[in-house]
Amino acid sequence: MRPNNGAIKLVAGNSNPALADAIAAYLATPLTKAVVRRFADMEIFVEIQENVRGTDVFVLQSTSFPANDHLMELLIIIDALRRASGRRVTAVIPYFGYARQDRKPGPRTPISAKLVSNLITRAGADRVMTLDLHAGQIQGFFDIPTDNLYAAPMMVRDIKERFELSKIMVVSPDVGGVGRARGLAKRINAPLAIVDKRRERPGESEVMNVIGDVKGAICILIDDIIDSGGTVVNAADALLDKGATEVYAYITHGVLSGGAVARIAASRLKELVITDSIQPTQAVRVSRNIRVLSVASLIGEAIGRTAAEESVSSLFD
């Protein structure tokens, strides 16, 4: 009999079925038949309904809301595949939850990103693939190979198609994101500004100052996560008050919790562009000023290259 070495299997959890279907379509590989459901008491049950012995298996699952449920699905799927003798199991996590807890900001606090990394490794993953980690050092929390993909090239293409680059100014919404914004600004040869803010309490931000002359510019805010939306809305107000003509935001992960979508809709932000690393809600899909870019081709190409033992980093050269 012919061994399965070289065959690719795609297994999807329940976090983002639309993205999983799009990745499967890009790779021309149907999703592996699997059941991921709940018992009456909400325990998670997983059954892989196809033979995966000797195959290269990629588990497609963001750890987005509800983060704990989707994380447990991921861990149990990995365990099921390991016990089914998958040759190599790769956890493909477009949005890596708990990434914002990547250090001890004060006494007696956890480093949850490290804990989650340990859980994924101990569950049996052989490698991890993710998108725009909140902090690059999280790659070092894993003791297995980790590929951190970048949405920036896709955003650059979209910006070049839609804007006159001579009028663009790239803006970091806080000091911590300067490196990310500078990288994108270099790709389009645009100047860089920074919004300096002071966060008084979690989930709230107060804009203090704009570093850079934004008068007459079309400002594009760049960040990796938008949650409550307060930082972006306040930054847009500050930039417009300083003379910017329009403000757009390109942000990879649209967490958009609570009343964030309504806050964005009521803001002076011209448009928020996010990716589908987290499945967009109905409110996001119908919002007048939120647009979604698909990362299916990016992740699909990275999966194909990983399976073929080709370079993934060359995607971003």
Image (cartoon, rainbow, N blue to C red):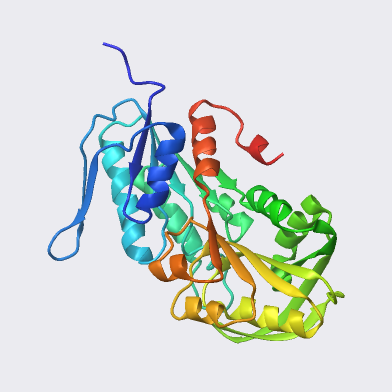
Looking at the rendering, which quadrant does residue 177 occupy? bottom right
Q: Position of residue 57 (x, y in %)?
A: 38, 35
Residue 271 sits above or below residue 309 on the image: below
Q: Position of residue 108 (x, y in %)?
A: 50, 77
Q: Residue at x 41, y 37 (%)?
A: 25
Residue furthest out toward the left: 40
Residue furthest out toward the top: 1
Looking at the rendering, which quadrant does residue 185 occupy? bottom right
Of residues 204 and 239, the one nearer the viewer is 239
Of residues 250 and 199, the one nearer the viewer is 250
Q: Is residue 145 visible?
A: no
Looking at the rendering, which quadrant does residue 298 occupy? top right
Q: Position of residue 310 (x, y in %)?
A: 58, 27
Q: Residue at x 42, y 55 (%)?
A: 62
Q: Position of residue 221 (x, y in %)?
A: 69, 68
Quadrant into which the C terminus falls: top right
Q: Is 219 situated left or right of 145 in this image?
A: right
Q: Is residue 51 visible?
A: yes
| Number of marks in the rendered image | 0
